[in-house]
Amino acid sequence: MRTIDTESTPRATAASEPASAPPTGQRQRAALLPWIWAAALCLLYATVAVRRHQLMRTTGYDLGIFEQAVRAYAELRAPVVPLRGEDFNLLGDHFHPLLAVLAPLYRLFPSPLTLLVAQSALLALGAVPLIRWAVRAVGPRAAHAVAAGYGLSWGIASAAAFDFHEVALAVPLLACSLEALGRRRWRAAVAWAAPLLLVKEDLGLTLAAVGAYIAFKGSRRLGLATAAAGLLGSALEIKVLLPALDPTGGYAHGGQLAAAHGSLLSALAHAPLDLLRPDLKATTLILVFAPSALLALRSPLALIALPTLLWRMASENVFHWGTAFHYSAILMPVVFAGLLDVLGRERDPRHVRAALATVLAVTAVLLPSFPLAQLAQRATWHTTAHLRAARELLARIPDGATVAASNRLAPQLTSRCTVVLFPTFPVGGRLYEYRRGNLPAPTAEWIVHDPEAPEAWPYRRGHWPYPLEQQLTELAAARRTYGYELVARRDGITLLHRKAAPGAPPPRP
């Protein structure tokens, strides 16, 4: 592969190394460059994530859920998650057994901050193979532009600033696989991509795309075998393993593709237009490749993003269509690998410099609209009276208690209590029919409820899973009907407690 170093002559390539090797100090600096960037990015992401948690902007859905799962692994138990439902095994929601690798770390540091810092490190590690590739393709100085483009990209920033998600495990794995593809190291590429099957059920399709690329560019036998393994792995997880572990006996997310047209066949027939409407989908598709100045679209590596983009655009879940949350994190390594593939084949250093300047310009334009910009906001560094009141009330709940908590209070307690959502979120993804009085009697020892949402939030303006009026009704019913006593109320936050009746069985989450 031809490589361009903007600091050298236009003829310098990987195939024609200069007669004299670079000085040892220069090689050492080039080797350290990816790790220096990764450390800086990890610190940046962790600062945003930890501060959001301190401001109580993290939520039970999803930080609390994943903490309960990792906590169970750390205690050598199945990942049963009370926040998701009674006796709910989280492997029945999404298939992510690789989360267990975080259990030893959580055992040493049992805190939601452990997950947030681990996610920050994983996202930052995704930069290492890409920067190594950039050093070879465009030279050490120009590699800084690639590092900044990836590290500050909106897809990574959105994931770093929204709770914790299993997809963080996939980012460095896919980035290493893409680097191996760029160097035509096919077996290494497969070895790095194979664990994606253990991160999430849809990532078997990404593994299949890696295999298809290998079959097209290199070893046909290895590529076809990898593609088959990815497709069969995802099919096994979706059709067999997830239904076996899901309390409803099905795949909880399978109906989203066929909901609008009544059947999967009809959905496929409408797919060409549905993939681009409403306009939000087209905007997202452009923004996915914008960090590379759209140059990644010139590389066949961009096709590895296709499975993720297809299922997102075909989904009936509106959150899959936009740029928020963690859904685009897995796409950013693909986009920058495509960029490097294109730049590595570019013969004119001026074109390389112009491309990287455009990458930096796009990064600068998009940065204020995405979560890393929170670091420059005064509110991020201000602790309000409401937050102090919440911390005071949460401190009154003893360790080991069972607690029904508002969504954004839940992850403040999951490391030391058994926590469910208030009002209880049912198994199967459907709200209880509260209009018919079908909500079950609460069983938690404590209830802590906060009616305020700390920021604009997609789930019913922060009042999730029920409208605020319904939550207040249930809060009143807890005192009037179920015998909860008011312990304290501060700045609108309510703390209730109910003592178990003599001889009563222990409460179940």
Image (tube, rainbow, N blue to C red):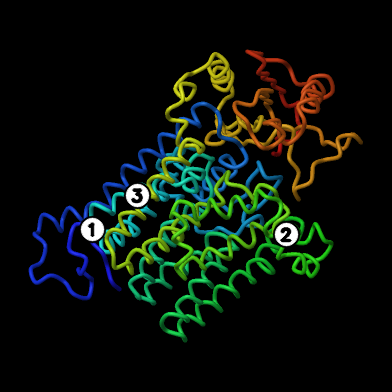
Residue 255 in sight in this render: yes
Looking at the picture, tell me which residue is in the foreground, 328 or 90. 328
Q: Residue 354 sits in which quadrant? A: bottom left
- In the rendered structure, the answer to whether residue 42 lies left or right of residue 155 reads left
Where, quadrant-wise, is the C terminus in this rendering?
top right
> Which callout, 1 or 2, points at the residue further toward the start of the chain?
1
Q: Position of residue 467 (x, y in %)?
A: 77, 30
Looking at the picture, tell me which residue is in the foreground, 290 or 402. 290
Where, quadrant-wise, is the N terminus in this rendering?
bottom left
For the residue labelled by badge 2, is the local secondary structure a helix, a strand or a loop? helix
| Residue that label 1 marks | 6
Q: Residues within 10 Å of mark 3 (few under 14, many from 20)?
A: some
The alpha-carbon separation of the residues under discs 1 and 2 comes to 43 Å
> Which callout, 3 or 1, points at the residue further toward the start of the chain?
1
Q: Residues within 10 Å of mark 1 (few under 14, many from 20)?
A: many
The alpha-carbon separation of the residues under discs 3 and 1 comes to 13 Å
Q: Position of residue 438 (x, y in %)?
A: 87, 37
Residue drawn 15% across and 56% down? 28
Q: Position of residue 42 (x, y in %)?
A: 37, 43
Residue 271 lies, with reference to residue 220, above or below; the image says above
| Residue that label 3 marks | 357
Residue drawn 73% across and 54% down? 316
Residue 47 lies, with reference to residue 325, above or below; the image says above
> Which callout, 2 or 3, points at the residue further toward the start of the chain?
2
Nearer the observer: mark 1 or 2; the answer is 1
Nearer the observer: mark 2 or 3; the answer is 3
| Residue that label 2 marks | 274
